[in-house]
Image (tube, coloured by chain):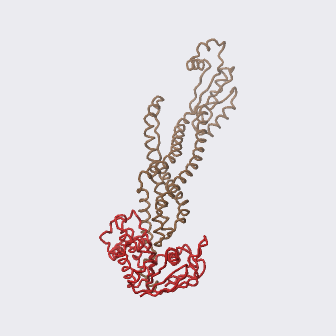
Amino acid sequence: MTSSAQRQNKPRFSLRVYFSHHKHAWKHGLRQLSKNPLASILTIAVISITLLLPTGLLTVLTNLQQATHDWNKGTTLSIYMTPDATSAQFSYVQQALSNVSNVGNIKYISPDQGLAQFSKQSGLTNVIQSLDSNPLPGVFKITPINQATPAVNLLRSQLLALPNITDVKIDMLWVKRLNAIIKLLQQFTYGLAIVLALAVLLIIGNTIRMNIQTYHQEIEVMKLVGASNRFIRRPFLYSGLLYGLSAAIFCAVTLDFFMLWLQGPLNKLTELYSTQFALDGLSISQTLLLIMAGCLLGYIGSWLVVDKYLRRISPH
Amino acid sequence: MIHFEKVSKRYPNGHEGLKKINLDVNAGEMVFLTGHSGAGKSTLLKLIAGLELATFGQIEVNGQNLEKLNARKLPKFRRDIGIVLQNPHLIPDQTLFENVALPLIIEGYTENDIGKRVRAALDKVGLLHKEHFLPEELSTGEQQRVGLARAVVNKPTLLLADEPTGNLDPELSLEIMRLFKDFNLVGTTVLIATHDIELINEFDTRVLHIEHGQLSEASND
């Protein structure tokens, strides 16, 4: 009776064995989550909120960017004439403007029109009436055909070369500033996402560490009957992955509901501005990315602690 | 099957568990190991199972030199050894079936094979009708029998037992020992550590006595 004779009856390592081991691992990974449902739900909720913070911020910023992108289309240039320009000089500029290639709509606001508009908008009629003379210059408002930033900038420098012009202002400058602020906030959010991803790793690592303690006895038995470290480790890796996966799904669903919830008040707001704007939740690819990130963080978080703590357990 | 050459085991606290022990157990033998608590019985079994390492000397088990056994090869080595401890070490939230199936799942048997082998093992220890019970629903004696079923379910070449009847009354103890004898009769090498001399006298097998870390052959009649 030799050991090799007995070995022959035992299954050799094969794809089937591989799958049966993984099936066992998934089953036991799930069992770890379902053993104490309340604790698992709380853990998933904490991870989910941690994921929700950067994801939500990014979604809101993307929407803001989308909104201001539409506003960008209304970029106009204001061309300020010198205050003492003669009517001949005006007509010369007007003529010249219509010959510049990127100039679409041209509108002239005379100093009188400008003053009337200003007094109407500001309500400072009395102050304005007390002025000796009209301090406003004549202004041409033009809409560029090509709204892209480089084209608009090129147009501005072309217009500045015209005679009797004091300044050319791009009126949507504040949109650009807002965009710059959004970019800054996005950068900040990416940084925040990295910090919070580390937090998720810690949360999952700690949960798995506690699970290992809970299953101390079972791990001892497995070591006793000859389970490899990989076999013992796998259910813990999978339960980590499941924590991450559930949290990511929960986060995506919450975010979508949140956006739906905001859409109502937003509609009221846009009605007042007589425009329309639909809030976008996560796209399918973003959702998939979030879920993948959740799974990966769960797996890595578990992987970081599992070996260290499993090694401490030995049967006696 | 088991070969010890001048094996010593010294613990970090200075306690000397075993002193220059020589031992040979042949394949198919059944051997009792007796001695007081703390005499070194458990240490000897742990060295055989690779649960602890010897301080000095050579150990060969199942054709494997244990000194050359690294942590990666250890699990595979242990799959050929059935181990029964005084506390049966059952997994509390798994049924008897699942508990006994564990070694087979690790080995990668098909579900069909697992079902057959687990039921055969449970039948052998008389607990087939309780396969869906949880360990806590069983008596101590029954739990020990489940531990035994798990130890033999993958037909190990060597069966080690450390005080397997330590928590049982004489009648149940005899029943358990008879089961060990049955496994020995089908070819398994069996080594049982016990301090129950009366029980040993019921069997006509080789007895080793260990005292103060030293081993001697004892007569059994």
Displayed quadrant of residue B58: bottom right
Q: Left or right? Give the position of B182 relative to A69.
A: left
Q: In this orientation, which residue lies closer to the viewer: A82 or A52?
A: A52
The mark total stands at 0
Q: Position of residue B201 (x, y in %)?
A: 40, 83
Q: Picture coordinates of residue A110 (x, y %)?
A: 61, 20
> As drawn, is B94 to the left or to the right of B40?
left
Q: Horizontal placement of B117 versus A224: left or right?
A: left
**Looking at the image, residue A165 lies above or below residue B79:** above
Where is B129 relative to A207, above or below? Answer: below
Residue at position x 38%, y 64% from top? Answer: B94
Q: Is residue B208 above or below residue B148?
A: below
**Which chain is drawn using red?**
B
B184 or A78: nearer the viewer: B184
Quadrant in the picture for the N terminus of chain A: bottom left
Q: Is residue A164 above or below residue B77?
A: above
The percent position of residue A247, horizontal first and vertical second, equals 46, 51
Front residue of A218 and A89: A218
Q: Position of residue B211 (x, y in %)?
A: 53, 80
Q: Which chain is brown?
A: A
Residue farthest to the left? B129
